[in-house]
Amino acid sequence: MNNMEAVTEGILYVVGDDGITVIQLAETLEISEEETQQLLDKMMLEYTENETRGIEMVNYGGRYKLVSKAISHPYCQKLFERTETRPFSQAALETLAIIAYKQPITRVEIEEIRGVSCDMMIRKLLARNLIREAGRLEVAGRPFTYEVTEQFMDTFKLKSLDELPELPEYGNSREDEELFG
């Protein structure tokens, strides 16, 4: 793998499920769109032909991303079935709560609320089928939006999201008046 391929692979890993367009990658690598397309085509072919790798590159809607190959899906499913009985981490619970209350919501919006990156947590929650992609926003970059799944509802024994506890209101309480009044 040459240096440009290694850099591109790293970029594809970092952008994760959002993927990247030829134009974005060309601007980042500071090469022409034609050179970028040739690089991506070559890499896609290498990933497809190399049966010793567990990932492949795909192009969905003009966005390139790395995904696991179908051969690994049954094993991933088995792994997550075993870990389903494990308790949720604080980060997982926070991310799930934000999505449940604010859905549909983008990764960036979740990160603004939590104050930390949540790309890996979203991947884990997607893999455990607790959240799903709900669509894309019609704004620059067309980010994915996320919502909870029926599996989430089953896991937390909810009939509807209306059963979630009310969130406290901030900014209108008597305590705020006393503190700032």
Image (cartoon, rainbow, N blue to C red):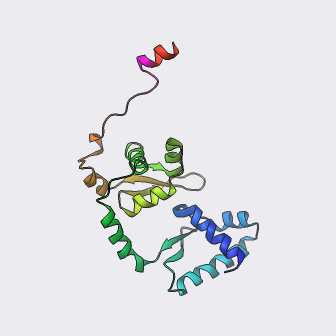
The answer to whether any part of residue 37 appears in the image is no
The percent position of residue 173, horizontal first and vertical second, equals 42, 20
Which residue is drawn at the image coordinates 26% and 41% (left, top)? 163
Q: Is residue 152 left or right of residue 113?
A: left
Instruction: Judge whether 28 appears above or below 172 on screen.
Output: below
The answer to whether any part of residue 110 appears in the image is yes
Question: 7 or 37, which is in the foreground?
Answer: 7
Q: Is residue 34 left or right of residue 125?
A: right
The quadrant of the image that shows the N terminus is bottom right
Instruction: Judge whether 129 appears above or below 79 on screen.
Output: above
Asked where in the image residue 161 lies, by quadrant, the reply is top left
Magenta span: predominant SS is loop
Q: Is residue 153 highlighted in magenta?
A: no
The percent position of residue 57, horizontal first and vertical second, equals 55, 75
State the extent of the magenta-drawn residues as a range: 170-175
Q: Is residue 70 left or right of residue 30?
A: left
